[in-house]
Image (cartoon, rainbow, N blue to C red):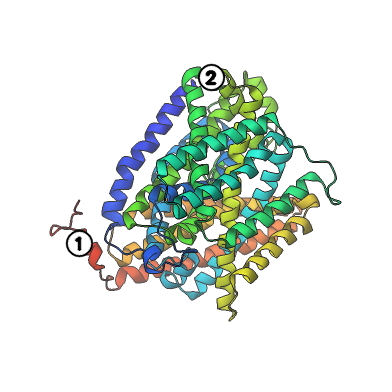
Amino acid sequence: MNSLVLAVVGVTMMVAGYLLYSRFLGRRVYRLSASFRTPAHELKDGVDFVPTNKFILWGHHFTSVAGAAPIVGPAVAVIWGWLPAFLWVTLGTVFFAGMHDLGALWASVRNRGQSIGTLSERYIGKRGSRLFLVVIFLLLLMVNTVFAVVIAGLLVTTPTAVIPTWGALVVAVLIGQAIYRLKWNLPIVSAVGVIALYALILLGDAVPIVLPENILGIGAEPFWILVLFIYAAIASVLPVWVLLQPRDYINGLQLFIGLGLLYGAVLIFHPQVVAPAVNANVPEGTPGIMPLLFVTIACGAISGFHGIVSSGTSSKQLDKETDARFVGYFGAVGEGLLALGAIIATTAGYRTLADWEAVYTAFNEGGVAAFVEGGGAILNSGLGIPTSLSATILATMAVLFAATTMDTGVRLQRFVVQEIGQIVGLRLGTAVATLVVLAVCLALAFGAGAGGTGGMVIWPLFGTTNQILAGLTLSILAVMLMRKRRPVLPIAIPLLFVLFVSVFALLVQMGDFYSQGNWLLLIMDVIILIAAVWVIVESAIALNRARSAEPDPEDEDELDSVGADGRPTE
């Protein structure tokens, strides 16, 4: 199979999904209205609630949701063959992820920027919402602790990425000042910012930063993990316009250019895919493709973490409700393109099938390293970029994706801690809640694993927890739409599928953890399964109640968006 065919088919499907399917969702299902006063205006505080240009907000949203997972998941899942991964990423992006992310953004905007956890109490019930928060907290804990390990590992193995990684912070702060304080022209600021970032990449490639093996009594990787958590804690309490928005926006542009380079190299070089379409000779110990494919690739097809970001930060910055289609759905398309690029890089970036099999010797092999190696080879062959610089570009891209997700993740976990505090009667300020998050993350990172890698202990449950949360978010959307007598089928079909494969995967993993004697993961698996089943039952009750209750009255702006014949107006 020629990799160019995969690229053309995949990109065409996702772009068509945005142009056609997202338009249907926005007009017929969610009925987005430009006249609706969003929380960014109604609750504007200059810190979390800030009306934002849709292109800047897209950059924040895209880079926040597209961490290391849309690279790692597909890069691991191709061990079953490129075809299953390709189908799940393309179809998942169009019919699952885009609909889910746009829907979560719409639901939060229609409820004063409340998070999915808070919305669960209103639409599912108080008992279900408590368990919902448990699942959200565990998922954010996994994301923050594991992404710190991924970033630190890349900074150690690819020291040429150190300067562009940290230099990007300086560029972001200057971009924020230029846009919000000096009111400079956005296209000019964007061009200067991208040029500065790529200049940093060239500088980093020429001047690699290699830390000594021992720093303050710890190794280089644990040192980077500590620095990353300190940075994320500081970034999470700053006003979003100071660092979060400009960093994510300019990173989004740089990362899209990086993807453009990768796809451009495929267009010129069009390497052959050496991996099998369906691998009938998987290494011993590789789990069955069903249901593990659908939880191994979470980000890049559908991800519950996206719902947390959509309702946690993006909804508080949406200038017009109609911008949700571009920010939410097209943000999912951006992540789908990254996942597709990871599939191509890890299946067509090797010379022969034997070379590919030498990398994929066991399940969970490959990952970011295979993406950097395979993608670097494609960039080198297609565009003539030196191997070292190619690796620096892709490693920096992976680090910036993961870092933007991590600092947003710490901010979101702070929101969850504050919500939990309210439930138990404690009003936690920003500083205290952030310290709680930092303490929990560092306790897991350094208490459960050597050298700050403790987050990896619970990582095997990330995919299933993520998809469980996606299913529960879809259940909230289904209840909202049922109460408004809107079309529910576009949500109901993905909802049933995602919940089925997620619960199935939890049961499969439960058996694996028991046979391995891994009691920590077994206990966590049981807790997540009980919480999931409980919330699913509560959701079914809420759906049945919504079906038989009087329909919710439509808001005036929603009525204005529908003509006398019941069809959406332009």
Tell me the kind of residue under disc 1. Answer: Asp
Disc 2 target residue: 382
Q: Please give the name of the residue rendered at 25% of the width and 62% of the height, measured from the top-left corner.
A: 558
Q: Please give the name of the residue rendered at 67% of the width and 67% of the height, measured from the top-left corner.
A: 435
Q: Please give the name of the residue rendered at 44% of the width and 49% of the height, measured from the top-left corner.
A: 56
Task: Look at the image and tell me whether residue 8 can be seen.
Answer: yes
Tell me the kind of residue under disc 2. Answer: Gly
In the figure, 405 relative to 136: above or below?
above
Q: Measured from the top left, where is residue 515 in percent x and y?
A: 73, 51
Q: Please give the name of the residue rendered at 51% of the width and 54% of the height, measured from the top-left corner.
A: 304
Task: Look at the image and tell me whether residue 286 can be seen.
Answer: no
Element on which disc 1 rests: helix
Task: Kindly give the residue lying farthest to the bottom in the view shown.
Answer: 425
How far, Cα to Cα, is label 2 from label 1? 52 Å
| In front of the other: 372 or 125 | 372
Element on which disc 2 rests: helix
Q: Measured from the top left, where is residue 109 in percent x and y?
A: 38, 63
Q: Measured from the top left, where is residue 417 in percent x and y?
A: 60, 69
In the figure, 452 relative to 87: above or below?
below
| In front of the other: 508 or 229 | 229
Label 1: few (<14), some or many (≥20) within 10 Å?
some
**In-image side of 434 versus 108 (left or right):** right
Disc 1 target residue: 560
